[in-house]
């Protein structure tokens, strides 16, 4: 019985990690902005220019 609980816990934690990673990647994707042809990439509060 204890093996089943341990396996279920591992599965639940794995699913939660995948969901958190998916949300983080989605947030990063949608918060990235390319500003015209100036070569400026703005992600959140960080601004990179070339």
Image: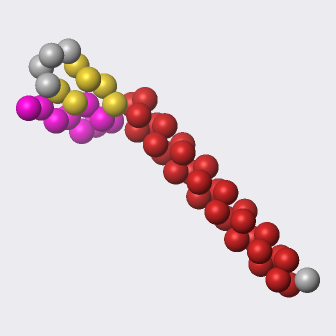
Q: Is residue 31 above or below residue 23?
A: above
Say which quarter of the image contains residue 5.
bottom right
Q: Is residue 26 above or below residue 13?
A: above
Screen quadrant of the C terminus? top left
Please tell me which residue is depicted at 22% across the width and 19% down the height of the picture: 35
| Count of all numbered marks drawn on residues in the image | 0
Report x, y in % for residue 4. Answer: 85, 77
Q: Is residue 2 magenta?
A: no
Q: Is residue 35 left or right of residue 23?
A: left
Report x, y in % for residue 14. Answer: 64, 63
Which residue occupies the extreme bottom position in the image? 2
Task: Give the extent of the magenta segment.
Answer: 42-50
Q: Is residue 49 left or right of residue 28?
A: left
Report x, y in % for residue 41. Answer: 22, 30
Say which quarter of the image contains residue 45.
top left
Q: Is residue 15 left or right of residue 2?
A: left
Please tell me which residue is depicted at 24% across the width and 39% down the height of the picture: 46
Please tell me which residue is depicted at 56% across the width and 51% down the height of the picture: 20
Report x, y in % for residue 19. Answer: 61, 49
Q: Is residue 47 left or right of residue 27?
A: left
Please tell me which residue is depicted at 40% across the width and 38% down the height of the picture: 28
Say which quarter of the image contains residue 1.
bottom right
Q: Is residue 11 above or below residue 44?
A: below
Which residue occupies the extreme top position in the image? 36
Classified by dominant secondary structure, the portion drawn in magenta counts as: strand
Which residue occupies the extreme left position in the image? 50
Q: Is residue 46 above or below residue 1?
A: above
Q: How is the image coloured?
A: secondary structure
């Amino acid at each position: 019985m204890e093996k089943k609980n341990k396996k279920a816990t591992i599965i639940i934690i794995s699913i939660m990690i995948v969901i958190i990673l998916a949300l983080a990647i989605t947030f990063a994707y949608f918060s990235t902005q390319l500003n015209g042809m100036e070569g400026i990439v703005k992600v959140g509060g960080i601004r990179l220019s070339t």
